[in-house]
Image: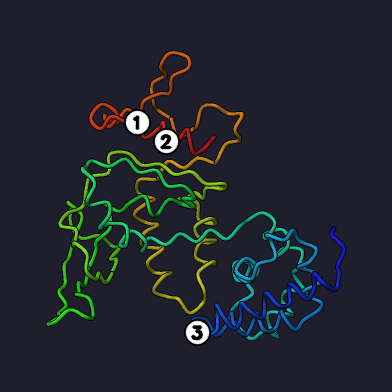
Amino acid sequence: MQPMTELETETLRDYYGKFARLEAADTSPIYAAWAEGVAADDEILSRLLELPRPKRQANLLFGAARHLGAGEGSYADLRTWLLDDWAKVRELMLARSTQTNEAGRCATLLPALARVPGPLALIEVGASAGLCLYPDRYSYRFTVTEAAWSSGSSAKSTTLDPADGPSPVVLECELTNTAVPNRLHEVAWRAGIDLNPLDITDADQREWLTSLIWPEHESRRERLLAAASVAAADPPHLVPRRPARHHRNPACRGASREPTGRLPQCGAGLCRRRGACPLRFAHAIAR
């Protein structure tokens, strides 16, 4: 247990105060009130100071509390609940981390991916549950506008759906002065690497992801659950980051071995057609 010092207390108090004013004030009244309450509460601060520094963050505390049933009431209600159930909260905060997984990011990546000759092999570093590995399985609604200084600017809407029809996940995005994707590339191979990959087919881990979404952000929660259903139907291959002493990355699952000293091939045919095996990159970043 780390000793509680006045400097550490004031640093943590300042962090929660800034979180309330700068991060939560305009987007989450509940979290803003909770963070203000923690900033003024020496008893809760002292308990947070017993945790390692990376585990003291507001998103982790509030997500853990909601995940365990604290509700979304006033700070007074939260405080009472935390003091009564701190052992459970502490255990969960030590075991978990903040791993939000926003499928909506695919809408901003798609214009760049569309410029790459397909089919694609995707590796995501920091994949969480891997929901951003499915850009080919989501539907997109792009609103395209010209720059503000352009004369006669106008807005146009473009819709892109997967080859097998509209997806339950619809991502909306506004594009300005950039080419609009005209198709969804086939993703021939996908894998993710994370310090602590989450299994999207596991109900508790899926619920943890939803608990990390701020209370008022219902549309994000609905999008996550819809994307989770898409990913769970064909779960992504996710592996934990391995220490450097491990030579072979588990991302190579299913790939045939080559002679000692050479890395295996992905088996998707991408190595021969594109001149570079995605597994070689997986090895490089996971070692």
What label does residue 26 carry, if any?
3
Query: Splitting the image into 4 quarters, where does residue 55 fall?
Result: bottom right
Quadrant where the N terminus sits is bottom right
Query: What's the amino acid at mark 1?
Result: Cys
The answer to which image quadrant residue 44 occupies is: bottom right
| Mark 2 lies on residue | 281
- Residue 176: image x %, image y %? 24, 71
User: Which is closer to the viewer, label 2 or label 3?
Assistant: 2
Q: Residue furthest left?
A: 152
Q: Amino acid at mark 2?
A: Phe
Estimate how packed mark 2 is, as few (under 14), some (14 to 19) or many (20 or more) residues with alpha carbons within 10 Å: few
Across and down, in percent, residue 38 comes to 71, 79
The tag earlier along the polypeptide, 3 or 1, is 3
Q: CA distance from mark 2 to mark 3?
A: 40 Å
Which part of the image, by quadrant, shows the C terminus? Answer: top right
In the drawing, does residue 169 fall left or right of residue 209? left
Name of the residue lying farthest toward the top: 259
Mark 3 is on which residue type?
Asp
Q: Secondary structure at mark 1?
A: loop
Please tell me which residue is depicted at 21% across the width and 72% down the height of the picture.
Answer: 143
Q: Nearer the viewer, residue 13 or 230?
A: 13
| Sequence-earlier tag: 2 or 3 | 3
Q: Quadrant of residue 76?
A: bottom right
- Say if 254 sits above or below 23 in the image: above
| Mark 1 lies on residue | 277
Toward the viewer: 127 or 10? 10
